[in-house]
Image: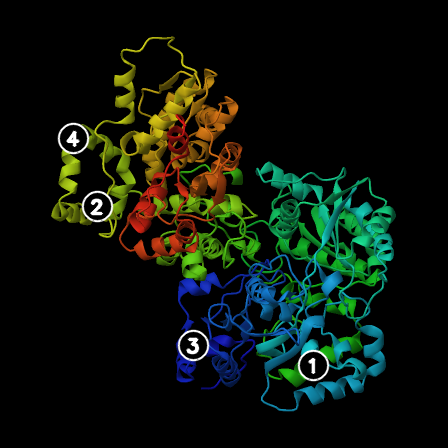
Amino acid sequence: MTVTDPVTDPTTVTSADLLAELARRGVTDADDSTLTRALYSSDASLYRVVPQAVVRPRDADELTAVVDVARTVGVPLTMRGAGTSIAGNAVGRGLVVDTVKHLNRVLEIDPEARTARVQPGVVHQALQRAAAPHGLRFGPDPSTHTRCTIGGMIGNNACGSRALGYGRTSDNVVAIDPVWGTTAGDVPARLAALAEAHLAHVRTTFGRFSRQVSGYSMEHLLPERRSVDRFLAGSEGTLAVVREATVRLVEETPRQLVVLGYPSMIEAAEAVPAILAAAGRPVDAAVPVEQGGLVACEGLDARIVDLVRARGGAVPDLPRGAGWLFVEVSDPGLLAPVVAAAGALESRMVDSAAEAAALWRIREDGAGLAARSLARPAHAGWEDAAVPPQALGAWLRDFDALLREHDLDGVPYGHFGDGCVHVRIDFPFEAGAGGGEAGSAGAARFREFLVACATTLREHGGSLSGEHGDGRARSELLPIMYDEESLRLFGAVKAICDPAGILNPGVLVDPDPLDADLRPERPRASVRTALRFLHDEGSMGAAVHRCTGVGKCVVPSLPGQGVMCPSYLATREEKDSTRGRARVLQEALDGSLVHGLKDPAVHEALDLCLSCKGCASDCPTGIDMATYKSETLHQTYAGRRRPLTHYTLGRLPRWAALAAPMAPAVNRMLRLRPLARMAKATAGIDQRRSIPAFPARTLRKQVAAASSAASGPETPDVWLWADSFTDHFQPGSGLAAIRVLEAAGLRVAVIPERACCGLTWTTTGQLDKARTMAARTAATLAPYVESGVPVLGVEPSCLASLRSDLAELTEDPRAEVVARGVLTFAEALERLDVALPDLTGVEVVAQPHCHQSAVLGWAADQRLLERAGATVTRVAGCCGLAGNFGMEKGHYETSVAVAETHLLPAVRANPDAVVLADGMSCKIQLDDLAQVPALHLAELLASRLEA
């Protein structure tokens, strides 16, 4: 097999030949499908480069074989890590190598030596968990620590928020087992000789301050500090591939957080040198950092905090100001001098671990939040420039002037104690203007600004990159930062380590143009949508391009109480992540690789989406995959034959209404196994699922019969909306709610009209019918809401549909009235100040419905339970049934796997607890898989009324 020029023309080797050669070497987990190539065409940067194939080596020997294949056939090879590269370091035209799937083990923890030996695909969080029982931790902690890999951290020389205390990744590397881009065996010696020949230049040019990450870190090749292992940190996969690494661990120590408020981020930046001096830290520290008293000094802009509040997120009290510094110390004795020297408007000691975690979570979500905190979408590109800390204030003032000069805006935040500033900028890319080619107005403006920034940064002695690497975004700018001798040294290093240029070509040496392959410049199909896409000016294209790839959806285990992304937690496949689905939808609407929303690749990616809406609240950029899936199904099947379950489960409320008059007879029939099997097969339901029984009478009929002889005023104190599921399947929840309210002396009436939210039609993409139902329901419920009498619902999925889907489906202004006015049961109890029965001593395991977590919120429920005296364990994630999803054939195994991530282990761990689940889906899942009867909050409170 021969090639002419492997770097500039990788297509001379066909994908079939490439996969065959890999298989011959024993590498079988390789894929060149349209779906997989779409999933890996982008990272978290602005760049899109479609690979020939994606390979997932199963062990270190397979990884070596993959590199050997790339060398032999002359195909470029790019290491991916977690796919969260912001500079475009993790996309490439040849082979993209994913180590997360298989090479993800912590091989050894040595507590005595304080080291860990790991495979490159180990997630940072997993290493921390392995080290924690020994009182140790890996020091650097990037904001993506829940999903970034150690191999990726080595590639970029990642630092994170606590680099002041623990150093960069290069400071914590002990040894690397590399596969070089060459077969020559004398690479370390030749690198040492290169540095020896240029000692004076290396000493005076490189390692001038801690965040000088751009280019190759030649200072690690100096005789007095020589470490080829540390030199490889920050080489961005252009010189070698990491088979495994040994890294240093440090002692985990308690830390104290103080928050300092300033009028703006510039004033916060100008205070940094005084804070460093007060903590006894030199502002010009250029040597590897040892663990010290000052651990972190982070900057956060008010606009990011405002966005969190606007989305309903919890924000602890902050000191007065529009910019803040989070200063964390491991030596409490530093707090007083730091606060005294800080010159802040106000300061606040954060003594609560929960509040500190909430504040750090905002900071960690900074990249995603900043992307949506301006009038236009904001982008990476000029992402993490760094200057010596004493120059930070001056640099930010000049940077602010550059933004104004170019009519741009950005939200700065970042590692101010290290002089490193992150920012997302509202570059006015116009989709379709450039078609992926450099030279459009948006790309030209992007280039002009980056060149101006690099030129100004040089005057401050700064580094183009402070931790994310140069990648495709900044490698072309290195001649502005470095002189010709430095650039020749970089070329010589590349020639020693990777003479054929197969490893991550286009980065650092012989760089690609910074305005080539820009994803936002690609053409974008205009889709006439059924949903209104209110948050994206009616554009589905804009909506799916919300995803910036920060990867919070690929966290191996849910932090806190999040929901996103249940199917990924079950399968650990990129195609089942919110990010992966968004990438495929982007490709479908951009149109060259995936051909429209009807393409099979789109439906394969969306197949295991539970429509849980977890991403709508948990994704920092506000991706709402449930909405995108509904629209995609609508576009695909409008006027065409649909899947069977769309007609059965997707229209369940209609069939339930037809069955209601014959409920006893229907129930008797479904108790006969042959008939039950036939019914399930006809409806497309998995045979392992149970079919819920119909009540003898619907909720509305039971209440109407009970109230026919009652007397009293016509207008009640509370209106109860009988959604279809409560009315036809779970009337006990509604009756319990009535009982609790009436016990408080309130008169309750059930809204007599049928008003279906249309949820099942919406989730199956039957949006024309859903729109009709939404308009009718808005017209029915609006007068009740406008009457001033509280209107509550008890089924969280239907209530969430009123709040989120109704206005997306219809322009009727009454939809907004209903969305703002309907209450959950817990919200109604709080508003009406209802006295609660005593739950002291009651242990509760609560599974909030995923739609309630994402749309309605569960805080009121938690407050009520704790106020009543219950001990509450809140389960994270989704139950796994998710309406029709878990009932359908083909989804049962995934549904069970989702339940096993959080819900079922929590129930098993608390066998004596009351299991609380307001949603009908959650109750069915618990009954089917754990034989546990779950209660609605109303049922729990009603059961304790007499006591």
Residue 878 visible in the snapshot: yes
Q: Calculate the distance from the C-alpha at mark 2 to the C-alpha at mark 4.
A: 19 Å
Q: Which residue is mark 1?
A: 228
Measure the alpha-carbon separation of dots 1 and 3. 36 Å
- SS type, badge 3: loop
**Residue sitting at x 43%, y 62%:** 573
Q: Could you tell me how far apart the alpha carbons at marks 4 and 3 are, in whole angstroms?
A: 63 Å
- The figure's colour scheme reads rainbow
Q: Nearer the viewer, mark 3 or mark 2?
A: 2
Marks 1 and 3 in Cβ contact (< 8 Å): no
Type of residue at label 2? Ala
Q: Which residue is mark 4?
A: 662
The residue that label 2 is drawn on is 683
Q: Is residue 10 above or below residue 282?
A: below
Which kind of residue does numbered mark 4 sit on?
Met
Residue 69 placement, left or right of 266: left
Q: Is residue 624 visible?
A: no
Quarter of the N terminus within the rendering: bottom left
Q: Compare residues 265 and 333 and report the one nearer the observer.
A: 333
Q: CA distance from mark 3 to mark 2?
A: 45 Å
**Residue denoted by label 3:** 14
- Percent x, y of residue 3: 50, 83
Q: Position of residue 178 (x, y in %)?
A: 60, 81
Front disc: 1 or 3: 1
Q: Amino acid at mark 1?
A: Val
Q: Horizontally, is 92 left or right of 319 in the view? A: left
Callout 3 crowding tier (Cα within 10 Å): few <14, some 14–19, many ≥20 = few
Instruction: Give the image quarter of residue 704.
Output: top left
